[in-house]
Image (spheres, rainbow, N blue to C red):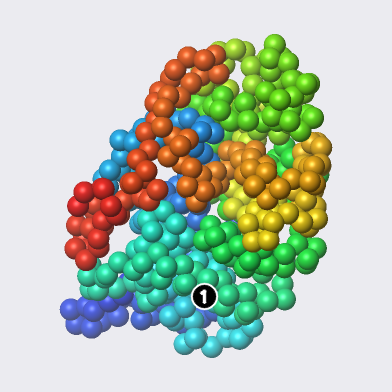
Amino acid sequence: MKRTIILLSSIIFCSSCDSYLDIVPTDRFTQETYWNSQQKVEAALVGAYSVLSNGNSFYSAGNMVYLDALTPNTYQYNNDINLISRGLHDANTGRFNSTWNQSYEGIGRVNNILANIDDIDFDQKIKDRIKAEAKFLRALYYFPLWNLYQGAPLILDPPNLETQGNLNRNSADEIYVQIIKDLDEASAGALANSYSGSEKGRATQGAVLAFKTRVLLYASQWQEAAETAKTIINSKTYELFNDYRALFYLENEGNKEVIFDIQYAYPEFTHSLDVSLDQQLGSSPLPDLINDYYATDGQAIHLSSVYDPQKPYANRDPRLQATVILPGTTFKGATVAANQYPSTGAGLKKYTIYKDLEKPISVQTSGTSELNYIVLRYADVLLSFAEAQNEFSGPSAEIFDALDAIRVRAGMPKYNRSLTKEQLRKEIRHERRIEFAGEGLYYFDIRRWNIAHELLNGDVHHINGNRIDSRAFQKDRDYVWPIPSIAIQFNNNLTQNPNYGK
């Protein structure tokens, strides 16, 4: 969180600390001695939040942005993401193990708070708010175990090394029920009448409802997803930031569109996206994405009368140049050379601090980025409402109002309101891809729409047309991630997902 945080330097949460002579250690905290004040509970809550920004966390800025390289949006030539995109991964691939482990690290920290907080005497309102925040965090940490692995041990008690090696794997449905339960209890508790927090990065009622909307949408619970999104919309607490590109500027962090974001602050809590994206170490936009941005008349480029193949980046949806660094355009105060971004011929602008007309004062180095990653923003709520309501009951004025708000903000024309349910579904899916390009959400979309196997088999090309790599996605395997081999070695009760071996 972007503020000074004073933490006790040697907090150790252990499940059993029996010593040789039952002497309580005086040089460190133990499970028995730690939980005795409000200050320590609040420090533990900060520790639970801090897992979000850990470099191996599922929610860290780099990991979320790089997920787009598992879609037709972007390409990454190195590390586990490339291995997965080529279909060469297995249960030993590091990304699967780190996501699994970091999820349970967060869950363990939350469970420890919830198990001990009621034994400590302090203001009940503060205690209730901490419980609500903890349950929101637990829902966040269980999300990848539900959505990506499709089931994992459901643990609601503090970490216990004696039992965690023989836990059975719970189903995706059981984890989903717990996620919704945690979110409902968080919403009904101390956050119920609060849509804003006094400290940046803390869970709010809006964050709880927005994340519940996402979970319901991904579970195809259309009516409930639409109703939950509508609650946020009707609150009139959030609004679209007026400038799509500036939404991601450092100076505009925490604006009215941001519902929940991962907090970074230099030099304590940083990431490396400024370097990795600009030096092509991270996700590089592909022509498949670039060509999917409409022309300014609202038509696909192959149907538009204002599109000129000789000037392919002119007269296009403004979000194209707000997101992608294109040859011949201006970025960092200079014209982008044809070979400046050799990986795919284009670079990802979103989630870097650089601006088009400003030359950087200094060269960024690895591990110095402090731009927050936005987990939940109001545009997502609007598009989730539009999709869920359309799937539930078909086109309506409310749906078009939500979509048009996003289009107008982008500088694009409003939609034709005579679209059928099927036509509107296509446009909503297109809008989600364009609005959230480079943010990691498209990977979840193409999986839940069951079209990943149609999009992720074949060659990958440079914008000049040259082949640069290939992709493979097995329909009967790759819609779920494998349970990490090391987790199964530690716990023989875990069953592997289909077609990943043992």
Local SS, label 1? helix
Using residue 19 as the reference point, say whether residue 53 is left or right of it: right
Please state which of residues 336 and 181 is positioned toward the viewer in this rendering: 181
Residue 145 x, y percent position in the rendering:
40, 59
Residue 346 x, y percent position in the rendering:
58, 22
Please state which of residues 472 and 58 is positioned toward the viewer in this rendering: 472
Give the residue number, with chain letter if any, for mark 1. 181
Residue shown at the point (67%, 44%) measured from the top left: 423
483, above or below 327, in the image: below
User: Would you say residue 233 is visible in this rendering?
Assistant: yes
Residue 438 x, y percent position in the rendering:
58, 38
Count of numbered circles in the view? 1
Residue 45 x, y percent position in the rendering:
52, 69
Please state which of residues 190 and 125 is positioned toward the viewer in this rendering: 190
In terms of image quadrants, where is residue 100? bottom left
234, above or below 391, in the image: below
User: Would you say residue 61 is visible in this rendering?
Assistant: no
Residue shown at the point (47%, 35%) measured from the top left: 455
- Mark 1: few/some/many CA within 10 Å (<14, 14-19, 20+): some
Please state which of residues 158 and 238 is positioned toward the viewer in this rendering: 238
Residue shown at the point (61%, 27%) measured from the top left: 290
Q: Amino acid at mark 1?
A: Lys
In terms of image quadrants, where is residue 470? top left
Pick the quarter of the image with the N terminus: bottom right
Residue shown at the point (64%, 21%) measured from the top left: 326
